[in-house]
Image (cartoon, rainbow, N blue to C red):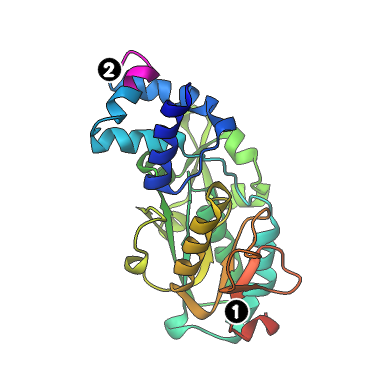
């Protein structure tokens, strides 16, 4: 692919999703967009690129963005954030109850649902012991309509189940379904609202949260976009809330809005907050 054609896709992805596509990832364009070309009746990527030079249909642009979005995820991915949620965050809220005993969580870039379902199952377990009578409202968002539909179904293959899900959780919160799939129980599904959301859009409509998970998505953004997303996310976070990033992500050198919770990799609080001492 020549540079001029590559730039069309790079600029489109940056404008529509914030994703930064570098030249060394140019091979992904053909491998991921060939099915999109065929779906729309174009002979090849060249024909698709020609359409993008004009005013392409909005639906076509959405299909391109969805195809180029990475949806790598698994249950209890990296484990550390869930340990921090269990050992640091939940004990803090136990000592500092929310109004109406309601904890609000935003899970950004939720992909096919493993992360928000992992959060919901962990909260279900902890509620019985530490937060009796509490309600949990989890909002899970993603930029892909297709992947959100999969997440809402809550159906997973044996391979997906085996990636990180403890056997005790499988037995307690899933039912075996036809075609060797596993379906998550309705009471866990009821804890989560899945909705479409682009991190470049106005976040005010999402409301306020006690906990925000924004893991393993900012690594695909350039520095200014990371800063913008972090600082706008901070406006949604309660003053004594908690902000989770992925293990390879950091706020250092990007923004002063957050500070690391001591001895908790990937866990942050607002810079002016004092509650991290108690966490």
Q: Name which of mark 1 and mark 2 comes first in the sequence.
A: 2
* Above/below status of 170 relative to 229: above
- The C terminus is located in which quarter? bottom right
Q: Foreground: 95 or 68?
A: 68
Tell me if residue 46 is in the magenta stretch.
Answer: yes
Q: Which mark is residue 41?
A: 2
Residue that carries the numbered disc 1 in the rendered image? 271
Q: Foreground: 120 or 20?
A: 20
Q: Position of residue 17 (x, y in %)?
A: 41, 47
Residue drawn 25% across the image and 31% down it: 54
Q: Position of residue 116 (x, y in %)?
A: 51, 55
Q: Which mark is residue 169?
A: none
Residue drawn 68% across the image and 74% down it: 261
Tell me if residue 243 is in the magenta stretch.
Answer: no
What segment carries the magenta color? 42-48
The residue positioned farthest toward the right in the image shown: 263
């Amino acid at each position: 692919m020549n540079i001029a054609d590559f730039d069309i896709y790079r600029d489109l992805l940056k404008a529509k999703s914030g994703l930064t596509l570098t030249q060394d990832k140019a091979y992904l364009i053909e491998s991921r967009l060939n099915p999109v070309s065929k779906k729309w009746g174009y002979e090849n990527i060249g024909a698709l690129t020609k359409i993008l030079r004009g005013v392409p249909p909005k639906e076509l642009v959405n299909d391109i963005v969805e195809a180029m979005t990475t949806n790598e995820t698994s249950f209890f991915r990296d484990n550390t954030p869930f340990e921090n949620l269990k050992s640091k965050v939940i004990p803090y809220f136990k000592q500092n109850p929310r109004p109406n005993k309601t904890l609000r969580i935003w899970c950004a870039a939720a992909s096919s649902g493993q992360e928000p379902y992992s959060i919901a199952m962990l909260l279900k377990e902890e509620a019985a012991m530490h937060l009796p009578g509490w309600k949990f409202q989890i909002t899970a968002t993603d930029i892909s309509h297709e992947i959100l539909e999969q997440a809402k179904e809550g159906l997973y293959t044996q391979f997906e189940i085996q990636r990180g899900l403890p056997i005790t959780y499988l037995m307690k919160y899933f039912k075996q379904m036809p075609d060797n799939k596993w379906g998550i129980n309705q009471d866990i599904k009821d804890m989560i609202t899945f909705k479409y959301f682009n991190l470049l859009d106005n976040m005010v409509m999402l409301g306020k949260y006690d906990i925000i998970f924004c893991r393993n998505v900012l690594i695909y953004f350039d520095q200014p976009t990371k800063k913008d997303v972090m600082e706008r996310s901070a406006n949604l976070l309660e003053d004594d809330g908690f902000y989770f990033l992925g293990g390879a992500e950091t706020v250092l050198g990007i923004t002063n809005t957050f500070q690391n919770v001591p001895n908790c990799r990937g866990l942050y609080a607002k810079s002016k907050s004092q509650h991290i001492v108690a966490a």
